[in-house]
């Protein structure tokens, strides 16, 4: 007996941050521009990238056969 596994809608959000300061950048290109800016002390080692996954709330009620 086989059951179909439901697909849960989800959204992935990439977050680019500065490790030391916590500054959030719009994207990796903005971070790279900060590294290249001689007026900041940002280095490539300060790069942090997180991935947030947001899923739609679903009910996980179990089904029983009678």
Image (spheres, rainbow, N blue to C red):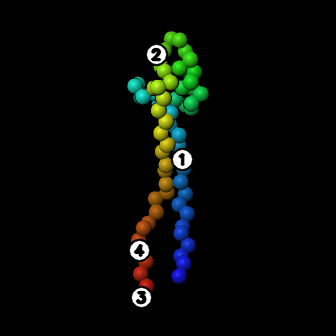
Distance from disc 2 to disc 1, alpha carbons, whole Å, reads: 30 Å
**Viewport quadrant of the C terminus:** bottom left
Q: Which residue is mark 1?
A: 12
Q: Nearer the viewer, mark 2 or mark 4?
A: 2
Q: Are marks 4 and 3 in contact (CB under 8 Å)?
A: no
In the rendered view, would you say 9 is above or below 4? above
| Local SS, label 2 | loop
Distance from disc 1 to disc 4, alpha carbons, whole Å, reads: 28 Å
Which numbered disc covers residue 41? 2
Q: Which residue is mark 4?
A: 62
| Local SS, label 4 | loop
| Local SS, label 3 | loop
The local crowd at label 3, few if under 14, some if 14 to 19, many if 20 or more residues have their Cα within 10 Å, is few
**N-term mark: 3 or 2:** 2
Distance from disc 4 to disc 3, alpha carbons, whole Å, reads: 13 Å
Outermost residue toward the top in this view: 39
The local crowd at label 4, few if under 14, some if 14 to 19, many if 20 or more residues have their Cα within 10 Å, is few
Q: Depth check: 63 or 2 in front?
A: 2
The local crowd at label 2, few if under 14, some if 14 to 19, many if 20 or more residues have their Cα within 10 Å, is few
Q: Nearer the viewer, mark 3 or mark 2?
A: 2
Which numbered disc covers residue 28? none
Q: Nearer the viewer, mark 2 or mark 1?
A: 2
Outermost residue toward the bottom in this view: 66
Which numbered disc covers residue 66? 3
Image-quadrant location for residue 27? top right
Q: What's the residue at 53%, 20% (across, down)?
A: 35
Q: Depth check: 59 or 52 in front?
A: 52
């Amino acid at each position: 007996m086989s059951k179909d596994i439901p697909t849960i809608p989800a959204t992935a959000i990439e977050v680019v941050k500065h490790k030391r300061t916590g500054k959030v950048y719009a994207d990796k290109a903005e971070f790279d521009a900060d590294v290249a800016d001689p007026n900041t002390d940002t280095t490539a080692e300060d790069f942090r990238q997180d991935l947030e996954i947001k899923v739609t709330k679903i009910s996980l009620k179990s089904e029983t056969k009678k």
